[in-house]
Amino acid sequence: MRDDLQLDGQGRLRHLLTIEGLPRQTLLDILNTAESFISVGEREIKKVPLLRGKTVVNLFFESSTRTRTTFEIAGKRLSADVINLAVAQSSTTKGETVLDTIDNLEAMHTDLFVVRHAQSGAAHLIARHVPPHVHIINAGDGRHAHPTQAMLDVFTIRRHKPDFSRLQVAIVGDILHSRVARSLIHALNILGAGEIRVVGPRTLLPAQVETLGARVFYDPAQGLRDVDVVVMLRLQKERMEGALLPSEQEFFQRYGLTEERLALAKPDVLVMHPGPINRGVEIDSRVADGPRSVILEQVTNGIAVRMAIMSITLGNHARPAGETP
Amino acid sequence: MHILIEGGRVIDPAHQFDAITDLFIAVGRIAGLGYPPAGFKAERVIDARGRIVCPGLIDLCARLREPGQEHKATIATEARAAAAGGITTLVCPPDTDPVIDEPAVVELIRRRAKAAGHARVLTLGALTHRLRGERLAEMAALKDAGCVGVGDGGHPIANTRVLRRALEYAATFDLTVFLTPLDPELGSGLAHEGQVATRMGLSGIPAAAETGIIARDLELVRDLGVRVHFGRLSSARSVELVARAQAEGLPVTADVAVHHLHLSENDLAGFDSRCHVRPPLRGPRDRDALRAGLASGVLGMLCSDHRPHEPDAKQAPFGDTEPGISGLDTLLALSLRLVRDGVLPLPALIERLTWGPAHILGLDRGHLGIGAPADVCVFDPDADWLVTADTLRSRGQNSPFIGWHLQGRVTHTLLEGRVVYEV
């Protein structure tokens, strides 16, 4: 299901809607560009003029703190004018449609929309609707995709473990509802990761999940064995009501990332989590705050990666010359 | 009015008739085949050379949106589209607003259809009050008012005790019960549970959401002997279940929507909301099994499952869009494509669109026997056309077949001997 909506005639990234179907080189370009932006955040004056005069709207139909904030900071460090809009969406109170909202903001000459929506496919709908000079970055659509999160995850992994060919990654927990898991599996596969595992009870694994290119484990004792990276997913409390799990306690006992379980992985394992974390539900505090955790590094890297994606889609990025991964 | 339809290939599956000949129509009825009845004087001659002449199509499931959703379509607009599609009889399920659970609604629809005049509109009454699955509807009164059957209107009855009583009560009045098998809870997702839904992050509807309900309903049929018709099957296993029940001699029939024979879950790519339908498009293997079921006759009828929508209903993120395809305009041409694909021969196909549905509705229509009401469709089987929004006469332009090249266009439609459409 390659989506040509994302690439223009010359194969350049116009929108970032999903990782699925993107060429390997596009992913490498994003990672390499992000490397060049890391130093911006470490300077006294954290700003480059790449997107000066551009208008970026963070349009969030679903609430978010981390993703919206890092997009905002990323846009500002690129000198864009960034506007945040949280549109309360309730299925019962039908207000303005998504496309009406977009039309109105587009009439204000917005150059880039960063969109989050609770429904899968929302970013595709918007990308198909806007004129060619307007760009869309998907900041999460339903259970479908969260491509910038996947890119910051592989960026973080690559900084610690640059050789992906033998990399073993376990993604643990609620795969069914996770756009992070779907996008990360695609990104790791495109970048040639050795093995991707999904670990969870059958109620939290989507049908035929192995067709995404992942090995399925119900038992974390096997799924975590000798892995290089563990990605824990957030478990939402609603899952208990949908008869998907009996209780948080049982989930933590069976699947929660504890020090004992982590000991099954490689000694230099990276512990990752897209946040926000539920301490004592999917991850023990000692692990979340422990020496193998790179959870806060993910957040920091998220800014550089989002700067890279914003500048690439807006077409003004200065590609680091001669750099190879 | 005496009308001669001259020189066409007349196909009348009910009488196993298939020959190039003339068809004579007098005072609204079929008056002769091959040679004119005594005293026939053609006032109108329709040249049907190179064309097919068959009974007018009977569409077992068409939502006309009136009463209640006139912003989507009206009986008048959809009856006109039906006539242009060679369809002379439309069966309207009871999920209108208000629900067809009292004679006044039946009467309203009848009056609107009569005023429109382009097609006959028949109604299915509700099995339960307001289709809520709690109390029985006044089925005897609905039958007296003209309902040709009773059904769940796309809202399957979760409570098996209520369903059993509704079936018994319907059978008391010799009503056929039209059920749409989909578990209300397990079937609450957006797409067929499988690879595509997993990739797209759409909540899944497993095939068991359909087969589980069919299996339950078949057990009730076995106990009660009531006539049940399953509408819009979508999975291979459903076809198997119905085939087995028919082999046992249970009084069970089933239909399929024509889009389920041409599309599959793969057509959802890019979140194409025009392919958002209920039941969902399933895998290519299911599609092939449904085609085989139509060919074998396990699925005895083919329908449009017409659901016209206003543009806004489809212009939203996939999960916020309304399910359904506007199907009246493409029913015949998509059906003819099955003949080209080698699924079944033309006379058998026409049977699934005419005599098949007429038979389970208990209608003396859908055939060209002498004395039958002259509902006739004349079409050019080879005429190419490109489906565009402009070629759709339904007010609903929500068709995933826009952009398809199809063969087969209606040239004339006669409703009780009246030309209601001609090119």
Image: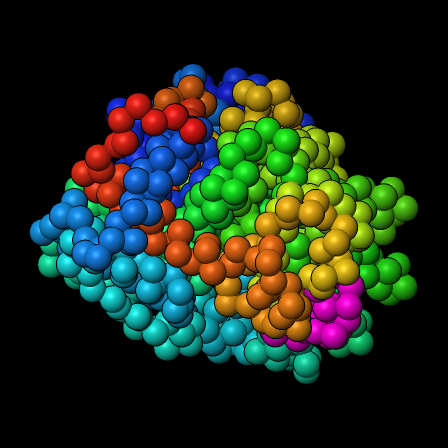
Question: On the rendered structure, is B93 left or right of B274?
Answer: right
Above/below status of A147 relative to B285: below
Q: Residue at x 29, y 47 (%)?
A: A39
Is A264 positioned to the left or the right of B79 in the image? Answer: right
- In this view of the protein, can residue B305 be seen by the observer? no
Residue A168 in sight here: yes
Relative to residue B413, is residue B159 depicted above or below?
A: below
Q: Is residue A98 left or right of residue A243?
A: left
Q: Position of residue B167 (x, y in %)?
A: 76, 69
Give the residue displayed 69% in from the left and 47% down from the top: A267
Q: Nearer the viewer, residue A273 or B81?
A: A273
Q: Is residue A260 magenta?
A: no
Q: Toward the viewer: B418 or A223?
A: A223
Q: Nearer the viewer, residue A156 or B265?
A: A156
**Relative image position of residue B355 (x, y in whole percent):** 63, 41
Q: Which percent across, then down, holds residue A72?
A: 27, 61
Residue at horizontal 26 percent and vertical 39 percent from the top: A312
Of residues B168 and A134, the one drawn nearer to the viewer in this rendering: A134
Give the total of numbered labels: 0
| Quadrant in the rendering for residue B17 | top right
Q: Which residues are magenta?
A: A237-256
Residue placed farthest to the bottom in the image? B135
**Relative to A235, is A263 above or below?**
above
Image quadrant in which the C terminus of chain A is located: top left
Q: Main secondary structure of the magenta part?
A: helix
Please give the name of the residue rendered at 44% of the width and 67% of the height, measured from the top-left corner.
B109
- Percent position (x, y) of residue A103? 19, 57
